[in-house]
């Protein structure tokens, strides 16, 4: 374990009870991710498959970046779609514990991924005053996505502690 990670574990661990989800943040940082998230045994875990953006400009050429928008626009679209999927499971974005983001190179950035565009959208939903929980996250550049015009795909894992059923009393 690196010194940074050990330091993070020593100083930035959220104090929780044994039956709560524990999030370990980055010391002295507002970056919207956690270094680690620990989940207790009595937890409902929901996995959200890789999700792509909806068309934001139907007048743009089909399958183009212009049809789906820039990275920030696409990330916002995806997070809103996932938010609805979570709601169908009785969960919210505050229950998200892990996020994987796959970005392709943006032609407007000489083929580099738009990490700033991702974070501009992402930080509106995670680590914000309205939703302070920060999941762990991996963001990496990939060669291609299954949707022409798509700049990113996001998958999430959510977890929520469930109250165990009351113990039956012996008569």
Image (cartoon, grey):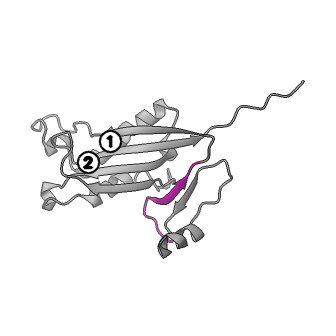
In terms of depth relative to the viewer, which is nearer, 135 or 6?
6
Circle 2 SS class:
strand
Q: At x 28% / y 59%, what residue is drawn?
A: 115
111 on left or right of 135: left
Q: Could you say where residue 67 lies in the image, as x and y percent from the top left?
A: 16, 40
Q: At x 16% / y 60%, what residue is drawn?
A: 109
Q: Could you say where residue 90 lies in the image, as x and y percent from the top left?
A: 52, 33
Residue of label 1 = 78
Vertical side of 54 occupied by 73: above or below = below
Circle 1 SS class:
helix
Q: At x 18% / y 55%, what residue is drawn?
A: 105
Q: At x 47% / y 33%, what residue is drawn?
A: 87
Residue of label 2 = 152
Q: What range is drawn magenta here? A: 28-39
Vertical side of 138 occupied by 96: above or below = above
Dot 1 or dot 2, earlier in sequence: 1
In terms of depth relative to the viewer, which is nearer, 42 or 106?
42
Q: Residues within 10 Å of mark 1 (few under 14, many from 20)?
A: many
* Residue 70 lies within the magenta run: no
72 on left or right of 67: right
Query: Residue placed farthest to the left in the image?
Result: 61
Q: Residues within 10 Å of mark 2 (few under 14, many from 20)?
A: many
């Amino acid at each position: 374990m690196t010194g940074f990670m050990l330091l993070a574990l020593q100083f930035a661990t959220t104090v929780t009870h044994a039956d709560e989800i524990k999030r370990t943040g980055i010391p002295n940082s507002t970056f919207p991710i956690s270094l680690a998230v620990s989940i207790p045994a009595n937890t409902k875990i929901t996995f959200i498959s890789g999700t792509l953006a909806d068309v934001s400009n139907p007048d743009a050429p089909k399958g183009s970046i212009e049809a789906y928008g820039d990275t920030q626009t696409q990330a916002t679209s995806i997070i809103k779609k996932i938010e609805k999927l979570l709601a169908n499971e009785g969960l919210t974005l505050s229950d998200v514990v892990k996020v994987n983001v796959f970005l392709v190179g943006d032609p407007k950035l000489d083929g580099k991924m738009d990490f700033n565009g991702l974070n501009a959208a992402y930080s509106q939903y995670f680590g914000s005053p309205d939703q302070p929980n920060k999941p762990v996250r991996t963001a990496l550049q990939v060669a291609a996505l299954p949707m022409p015009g798509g700049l990113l795909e996001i998958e999430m894992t959510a977890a929520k502690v469930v109250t165990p059923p009351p113990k039956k009393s012996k008569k």
